Image: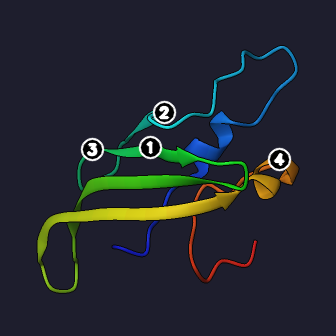
Amino acid sequence: MATRRHFGAVAAAFVRLDGAPQIPLCAGLTIVTAISQSTGDYESIKTVESVTANEIRLKYSSEMPFEDWLTGESGIAKTMVHRRVRQTDLQSRPRTSRCFSATATS
C-alpha cells in the first residue's frame, strides 16, 4: 500500500487556467481529497511544507482501509510520503499524473 502516492490533486491546484482564480502556492496550503472505494471511504491530505525559488516540498498522508482477498486480512494502511517538485517542472508541465510512483514512466 505504501507505493501509492497521489499528488495529482496538489499539482492540479497550481495549474493556471485562463480566467480561473490563482491560489497562492505557499507553505501550509492543504488540499483534502475524499475517496470512496469498496473497502471504505477515506481522505488523502496533501500539504505544501515549503516553497523556495528552486522547489516545493509536499507531504502526502492517508489512512486507507484495505482487504486482502487472498489472506482475508483487513485493516488500515497508513501512508506518509514527502516529495520535492522542481519549480521548473511545475511551470513547464502541461498536465499532471494522478498517481506518483518511483517506477512510473509518464
**Sequence order check: which comes first, mark 3 or mark 4?**
3
Nearer the viewer's eye, disc 3 or disc 4?
Answer: 4
As helix, strand or loop, the secondary structure at mark 2 comes to loop
Asked whether the residues under the numbered discs 3 and 4 touch, taking CB atoms below 8 Å apart as contact, a structural biologist would say: no
**Sequence order check: which comes first, mark 4 or mark 2?**
2
Q: Name the residue carrying label 4.
A: 91
Q: Is 37 left or right of 78, judged from the image as shown?
A: right
**Which part of the image, by quadrant, shows the C terminus?**
bottom right
Q: Quadrant of residue 86?
A: bottom right
The type of residue carrying mark 1 is: Thr
Nearer the viewer's eye, disc 2 or disc 3?
Answer: 2
Image coordinates for residue 59, horizontal then vertical, percent:
43, 54
Image coordinates for residue 45, horizontal then vertical, percent:
38, 44
As helix, strand or loop, the secondary structure at mark 4 comes to helix
The type of residue carrying mark 2 is: Leu
**Which part of the image, by quadrant, shows the N terminus?**
bottom left
Asked whether the residues under the numbered discs 1 and 3 touch, taking CB atoms below 8 Å apart as contact, a structural biologist would say: no
Q: Distance between the residues labelled 1 and 3?
A: 20 Å
The type of residue carrying mark 4 is: Gln
Q: Is 24 left or right of 4, judged from the image as shown?
A: right
**Sequence order check: which comes first, mark 4 or mark 1?**
1
Q: Name the residue carrying label 1.
A: 47
Is 43 above or below relative to 19? Answer: below
Q: How far apart are marks 4 and 1 (CA)?
A: 19 Å
Q: Name the residue carrying label 3.
A: 41
As helix, strand or loop, the secondary structure at mark 1 comes to strand
Residue at 43% over, 75% down = 3
Asked whether the residues under the numbered discs 2 and 1 touch, taking CB atoms below 8 Å apart as contact, a structural biologist would say: yes
Q: Name the residue carrying label 2.
A: 29
